[in-house]
Amino acid sequence: MLGGVTRMTVSLVLTGALSHVLPIMVGVMSAKWVGDALGEDGIYNVWIAMRQYPFIPPVDYNDRGRTAADAMRPFGTLVKIQEGHSTLKDIENLTNKYDFHGFPVVRGRDLIGYATRNKLLSFKFLGLHLSADTSNKKCRFSSPKQQLPSVENNIDLTACLENSILHLRKEVPQAVVVRMFQKMNLHQILFTHRGQLDGMLTKADVVALLAAHFPHTGALAVENER
């Protein structure tokens, strides 16, 4: 059962009962062959895919020549914060509506950084006493010298940005991106070109990519039980 259902490695220890070795080997190999005929994934991997748990298995991924551009979320579909346009109220609405780990901060298409949800929420809770006028002020995430007029009318949220954020070119092979998520335990990777944001790939996207071959992915996800 271990070899056929869970795909665990089974080792045999000879303790003198040689008469049991052949039947055990026949049973293990039969279970293994039946399991391979039904599918390549063990029951644990299938359960993780059906529940859509955010787990990236340590498997070798074959991208078949595809690049990150084929899997990333393009710029137009991203939920992002526009520096100089988004107000404190807008950011509060974003954190209430979405449970993302964070949001890219841009000025037009230019990437400013990545603001994490926890830091935005901590600033929000610290600023509960702010007046309605303050909640309508524009938010600033970069130096006041960088093309933002009327600095006194802006709220400085530079402390909400990640100190280091990984960004790559979208032409990078998918296999390289998957390995980086596996080995570095990343939450997201931003894809840029000459300082402009092209798209983003999150851990959830990579999990879905690795489980794309399984027809019942997400069948038992929490959202489907409600």
Image (tube, helix red, strand yellow):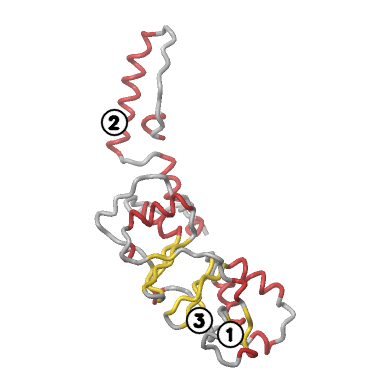
Q: Amino acid at mark 2?
A: Trp
- Seen at 48% across and 57% down, the residue is 186
Q: Is residue 112 above or below residue 222?
A: below
Check the picture and name the quadrant holding the N terminus.
Answer: top left
| Residue 36 placement: quadrant | top left
- For label 1, the residue is 144
- How packed is label 3: few (under 14 Cα within 10 Å), some, or many (20 or more)? many
Between 183 and 8, the residue placed more toward the observer is: 183
The percent coordinates of residue 153 (x first, y second) are 63, 90
Spatial CA span between label 2 and label 1: 65 Å
- Seen at 52% across and 70% down, the residue is 114
| Residue 78 placement: quadrant | bottom left
- Seen at 55% across and 71% down, the residue is 115
- For label 2, the residue is 33
Q: Amino acid at mark 3?
A: Gln
Mark nearest the camera among 1 and 3 is 1
The percent coordinates of residue 7 (x first, y second) are 38, 34
For mark 1, give the secondary structure.
loop
